[in-house]
Image: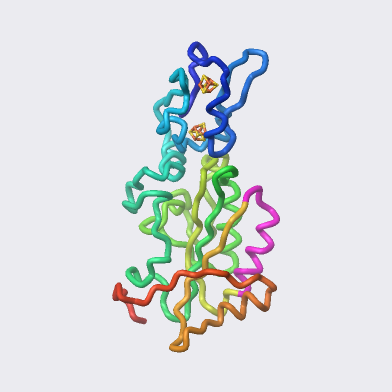
Amino acid sequence: MTVINKDLCIGCKICQKYCTVDAFVYDKEEKKMRVDQDRCTECYVCLRQKVCPRDAIKPVELDNFYKQFQHVLSDPVENHGVTGVTGRGTEEVKTNDVSGRVKKGQVGICIDMGRPGMGVYLRDAEKVAMACAEAGVELASQVHTPLAALMPDLTTGKLVDECLGYHLLSVIVEGNCQAEELKQVLQALKKVSKEIDTVFSLGLIVRTDENGETEALSCLDELGIPQPHRGKVNVGLGKPLTLA
Ligand code: SF4
Ligand code: SF4
């Protein structure tokens, strides 16, 4: 947990410029800063960059699992213990040429929630995960993605209640659906995007045909979703474990 030692704080407000989610709150009466613990993501930017001239910002031991989870996903230099990946703990299905996680006839779904300046509460990640699961997405397991550790039943996407109030800098909801289910998944995402208090960007991972075409783009057109201006093309040199 990140806290301010009030005996050291001189209320200069320098720290406010550095917080990724506006978690430093100035107390006008006391003329001191405090950390809004509901907003703080434990990203440790303020601590790593030593932004306080009085060294008044202090880390307090993260004494529960959810606090540690929050820190590991919000601090880009932390390594996730299970997946072994730094920065949100997942390589996502974007490395499909190596992992072969998205098979022919499937679409990989990667929903990148939250942004610096905004963050994401896990209650909103739950809404998105549940909307995906209901629309036919098979959510990724915790071998691949950290969020699954909070999801006792991957078929529903429901998270454990204890975690819902925690605020992260960013988190990724990911999984696969069958190509014919993509339209209903996109419709569910359009609907849930109006029910959450943050933003997300959507990545679609597909195997193109020999002409470089994919039906997924027609699906976007059909629903009036602008086609992406950029994409990442993996040419398959990683020899995926499955060619199916
Ligand atoms: S930078 Fe340090 S001294 Fe200045 S307001 Fe923030 S915590 Fe207080
Ligand atoms: S740990 Fe991150 S979110 Fe928390 S006060 Fe510091 S910069 Fe802001």
Q: Quadrant of the C terminus?
A: bottom left
- Give the number of callouts: 0
Q: Would residue 186 be counted in the magenta stretch? A: yes
Q: Residue furthest bottom?
A: 210
Q: Position of residue 133 (x, y in %)?
A: 55, 63
Name the residue: 54% across, 39% down. 20
Residue 241 seen from this side: no
Picture quarter containing residue 69? top left
Name the residue: 58% across, 42% down. 117
Decide if residue 175 is on the left or right side of residue 219. Answer: left
- Whether 74 is drawn above or below 19: the answer is below
Name the residue: 39% across, 51% down. 89
Name the residue: 41% across, 56% down. 145
Q: Residue furthest top?
A: 7
Decide if residue 127 is on the left or right side of residue 208. Answer: right
Residues rendered magenta in the picture: 183-198
Residue 70 seen from this side: yes
Q: Nearer the viewer, residue 46 or 131?
A: 46
Give the dominant element type of the magenta stretch: helix, strand or loop.
helix
Q: Position of residue 66 (x, y in %)?
A: 46, 39
Q: Would residue 122 be counted in the magenta stretch? A: no
- Whether 209 is drawn above or below 133: the answer is below
Q: Position of residue 142 (x, y in %)?
A: 39, 55
Q: Position of residue 125 (x, y in %)?
A: 56, 51
Decide if residue 126 is on the left or right side of residue 74. Answer: right
